[in-house]
Structure formats: C-alpha cells, structure tokens
Image (cartoon, rainbow, N blue to C red):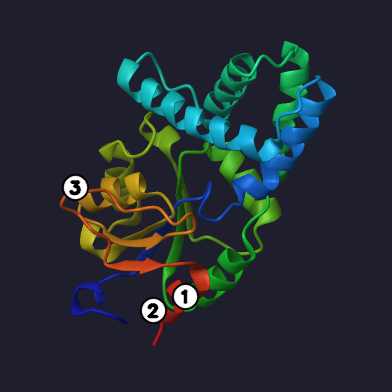
Amino acid sequence: MSGHSLERVKFLTFDIFGTVMDLTGSLAGPAGDFLAANGSDMTGQAFYADWRGRQRIEQYQDNLLMLGHSGYLETCRRAFVYCLKKHNVAYTAEAVREFMQVYMDLQPYDDAIEGLKSLGSRYKLVALSNGEQWYLEKLLGTNVPVEFDAIISVDQVGAFKPAPGIYRKAVQRLGCGPGEVMMVAAHAFDILGAQACGFRAAYVNRYNLPTEDSGYQPEIIVDDFIELAQRLLP
C-alpha cells in the first residue's frame, strides 16, 4: 500500500452514481431517443451534460432549503423536466414518468467491477450513496455482480452528500474511526466532504477534472478502478 497514513484503512466507501455506475453511457442514449420522439434535434450527450449539472443544483437546493429530503430519483426527475423546459422540448408528465424507469437499468463501468472484485480481497466494500436505500439495494443487487459488505444511503440522515452527516453516519454504522475509512469517488465534492470528516480519500478522476481548491487533497488520484486496485493492493 502506498503511504504510511493509509495502513489503518479497513473500509472503502464508494460513491455509486458516476463512480461505479456509468451514468452518461446509461442515460445519454435514452435521453436522445426521448428528445427525437418529441421533436428536438439536440443530442442526448449534450442534453445529458446539462441535465447532470442541473441535478447537482437540485440536490444542493434540497439541502439548503431544509423542507424535507426529496430523494435522489426525485431530484433527477426535477432536473430532467427543468432541462426539457430550458431547451423547449415538449413533454407530458406521463412521458416523463415512463422515461424515469431508465434509472432501474443503469450499468456499471467495466473497470469498476474488475477493481471492486480485487479490492474485496483485502477491504470491506461499502456503498455510500445519494440514492434511496431501496433503490440502491435493488440496483446493486441486480446490475453489479459484486457483494457489498454494507449499503448506506443518505436517507439515513436526510441530506445529500457532501453534507457531513452521511460520512459520520457511515463511521457510526461501521463501528470504526474516520481514519479507517477511505472514500472512493469520481466527484471532487464527495472527496472534500469525506476528508473534512476525517476520511482518507481516493479520487477516481474519470472526467479529467481538478480537485477542489480547499486545503484538502486526496491521498490517491487514479484514472480508474484497475489502477486503484494496483495502488492499494500489495
């Protein structure tokens, strides 16, 4: 293992959406089909990039307004509708409800599956996700051929990451100290949130984006899960 400071790590907590699950690959195509069926010539790739950015805003607003936790799938739906309106795409509420079923068939990155299988030989694997508990259990159980030792949803604290409660809840649930946990994520805000709560951190930089300029920096930066396993396993 690289670095004396990581020798205490026993648990790897994984972001799921965009880190393990390939959101662009799973959603851009169906989004493009929806747009074409409703008279838009916008590509699914371009629309999805906009949609994903808006969904983050929906989550942040959900945390800030404190009107009650809406849930991951609802923020995805709100963001989808917002972007349809933004790009003047005709839709019906029923069509949107039907489209949202695409979230039940998200597919993982191939490297994530290979890396998780290797890492499970040494570490406890924990899903630590913005998704609803029931949804995570169904999705991971059906579409990810790797057994997680625990699945922890932000439902348990009623706020989306990077709110500190979910990282603290993970430590409580796992019965360990923060320094025994490493957060693995492809999103710099998730890395920042975890490190601010005392976690170690591995940034899977799938999207070639910078880390946060915050004073916290991940101990490990890799391109994918295969490289992560190479860095963490003897």
**Quarter containing the C terminus:** bottom left
Image coordinates of residue 107 in percent, x first then y, are 68, 52
Crowd rating for badge 3 (residues with CA inside 10 Å; few <14, some 14–19, many 20+): few
Crowd rating for badge 2 (residues with CA inside 10 Å; few <14, some 14–19, many 20+): some
Determine the residue positioned at 71% across, 29% down. Answer: 42
Q: Compared to 90, does 12 lie above or below?
A: below
Quick check: 103 left or right of 170?
right
- Kindly identify which residue carries mark 3: 214
Q: Quadrant of residue 155?
A: top left
**Quarter containing the N terminus:** bottom left
User: What is the number of callouts on the image?
Assistant: 3
Determine the residue positioned at 38% across, 77% down. Answer: 232
Image coordinates of residue 185 in percent, x first then y, are 42, 55
Q: Quadrant of residue 165?
A: top left
- Kindly identify which residue carries mark 1: 227
Do residues under tags 1 and 2 come within 8 Å of each other at their CB atoms?
A: yes
Amino acid type of the residue that numbered disc 1 sits on in the rendered structure: Glu
Q: Compared to 98, does 156 lie above or below?
A: below
Q: Nearer the viewer, residue 201 or 13?
A: 201
Alpha carbons under labels 2 and 3: distance apart: 24 Å
Q: Nearer the viewer, residue 149 or 19?
A: 19
- Kindly identify which residue carries mark 2: 231
Amino acid type of the residue that numbered disc 2 sits on in the rendered structure: Arg
